[in-house]
Amino acid sequence: MADWIDIRKDDRHVAVERRRAQALKQSAWWKQQLQRGVCHYCNKDVGATKLTMDHVVPVARGGRSTKGNVVPSCEACNKTKKYRTPAELVMEELGL
């Protein structure tokens, strides 16, 4: 599947959104998301300190650092997802 995904990232967009992500990580909203300690993707309770911020629509693909596009993710799920969207992951699991 990865062979058909054409990623043409905009380095300026990525830099801006990374800064916005850092600011969002300091917000009370994000800290509340982490307190649950549960990965958005696998639903495992890994604890707040083991969670990372994942962009559902990856920044490299035009995603933004907003509350509607970031979720707490365990390191394993975040690494598995990479630059793909959740829909692409499902398609891959189905062999499409």
Image: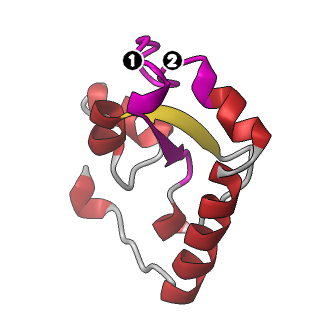
Question: How many callouts does the rendering have?
Answer: 2
Q: In the rendered view, how is the structure colored?
A: secondary structure
Q: Which residue is mark 1?
A: 46
* Neighbours of disc 1 within 10 Å: few (<14), some (14-19), many (20+): some
Residue visible at 34% across and 32% down in the picture: 77
Percent across and percent down for residue 11 are: 48, 86
Residue 13 in the magenta stretch? The answer is no
Q: Residue at x 53, y 33 (%)?
A: 72
Cα–Cα gap, marks 2 and 1: 6 Å
Q: Is residue 29 above or below residue 45?
A: below
Q: Residue at x 45, y 79 (%)?
A: 9
Q: Which mark is residue 3?
A: none
Closer to us: 16 or 32: 32
Looking at the picture, tell me which residue is in the foreground, 8 or 81: 81
| Secondary structure state at the residue bearing disc 1 | loop
Q: Amino acid at mark 2?
A: Val
Q: Secondary structure under badge 2?
A: loop
Residue 64 showing in the rendered view: no
**Above or below — where is 6 with respect to 84?**
below
Q: Amino acid at mark 1?
A: Val
Mark 2 and mark 1 lie on one chain; the one further toward the N terminus is 2
List x then y, in percent, for residue 96.
30, 36
The label shown at residue 38 is: 2
Give the class, few, some or many, for how many residues have Cα within 10 Å of label 2's Cα (few <14, many ≥20).
Answer: many
Q: Is residue 15 left or right of residue 32?
A: left
> Vertically, is 7 above or below 21?
below
Closest to the observer, 8 or 67 = 67
In terms of image quadrants, where is residue 12? Answer: bottom right
Range of magenta residues: 34-57
